[in-house]
Image (cartoon, rainbow, N blue to C red):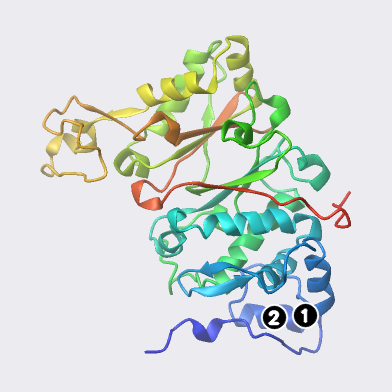
Amino acid sequence: MDDPIDDKAVPERLEVAGWQEAVDLFFENDWTDGLPIVPPTDDLVRAMLAGVPDRDPEEVIGTVPPRWAQATVRVCAVNAVMAGCTPAWMPILLAAVEAVLEPGFNLAGIQATTHSATPLIVVSGPDLKRLGINAGYNAMGQGFRANATIGRALRLIMINVGGGRPGQTDLAQFGSPGKFGFLLAENDAASPWEPYRVEHGFDVDDTIVAAFSAEGPHSVTNHVATDTFGIGTSIASCMSTLGSNNAYGMGEVVVVLGPEHAEFFRKEKWSKDDLRLYLYQKARNRIGDLMFERRYGSFYNRMWPKWFDRTRDAEEVPVVVRPDDIHIFVAGGPAGRFSTVIPGWGGLGGRSVIRKVRAAAPSAAAPH
């Protein structure tokens, strides 16, 4: 039986009458995410490849599920052009592609799930300002070309190389706006702690990307608390909602503290581990609640560790197996006492992956 999505593969070369005809052709063939693209001309692709002069354009980064076609450096550059990237961001994009294609990340599952899971890419490094990557106001919103187009380029690769198209292989019931592209940057200057990259064994001068399987962000508002306990309670409550996949499937959770909330942890000298342990203790649900007081009978959830006593309705189940499954960042603007919880896909969603970004080409200048 022929692969039903092979006919949507992008040909190696296309001849069209003009710019508008190219955009329309990409729409007609489902080679886009529903938004107009920049037609990837030879000149633009060559310019994009100049951002990674140390990489062979024919180097295979990996195969992208569920179509399992090869993502070469050149193919990634084509999709980067389509997304509106500049050459300076190619090293970030290639590191993101490498991360999500790690088998343990389970991109095949993300591409096919009925859930709204999508790759979240978090960038941590000293070069964000030079590269034009926003970690401040509207950190997960519109208005910043780098954040929007790097995330979008990854999604276009998932569509055009991996074949992840809605109703065919992508069976998400609702999806989320994050499926157009979901990129967050760590705000080192606003954080009371060492950067995420240092926490995970990289040098402070390195730039890394971390990939997570994620839902959309859930705002945590707390304008009342004047200490860490109150803020932590609000975050834990958001983490443990009964509708979250983490409540049943555990997995990993990303917590993003806003600068005003982070300042309380600075003043009270809480470490990241202090906050992680607090959230691990507080973000829990009674088994009785998770089983709806056994209204629909009892069930054995294989994703819960064996050491949970399923016979006691009062037994409390944390939303992650271990504290280290809670990943903490600081980002966003300095005004407003908000933080954000980004739930994961749960235990079926694979594990987060970190990749170091190769040094950007000096000739690939970032936009002003």
Judge whether 116 appears above or below 39 on screen.
above
3D distance between C-alphas at marks 2 and 1: 6 Å
Q: Residue at x 19, y 38 (%)?
A: 291
Dividing the picture into quadrants, the one containing residue 126 is top right
Residue 280 lies, in percent from the top left, at: 39, 26
Q: Are marks 2 and 1 in contact (CB under 8 Å)?
A: yes
Q: Secondary structure at mark 2?
A: helix
Q: Residue at x 64, y 31 (%)?
A: 195
Judge whether 188 appears above or below 140 on screen.
above
To which residue does mark 2 refer? Answer: 24
Circle 2: is it few (<14), some (14-19), or many (20+) Cα within 10 Å?
A: few
Whether residue 334 can be seen here: no
Residue 218 lies, in percent from the top left, at: 50, 38
Dividing the picture into quadrants, the one containing residue 53 is bottom right
Whether residue 363 can be seen here: yes
Q: Secondary structure at mark 1?
A: helix
Disc number for residue 244 = none
Q: Residue at x 64, y 26 (%)?
A: 194
Task: Check the picture and name the quadrant holding the N terminus.
Answer: bottom left
Q: Residue at x 58, y 11 (%)?
A: 269
- Tell me if 146 is positioned left or right of 251 in this view: right
Report the number of discs.
2
Dividing the picture into quadrants, the one containing residue 97 is bottom right
Judge whether 19 appears above or below 62 on screen.
below
Amino acid under disc 1: Gln
To which residue does mark 1 refer? Answer: 20
- Tell me if 44 is positioned left or right of 337 in this view: right
Amino acid under disc 2: Asp
Using the image as rendered, state which of residue 323 and residue 290 is in the foreground. Answer: 323
Residue 191 lies, in percent from the top left, at: 66, 25
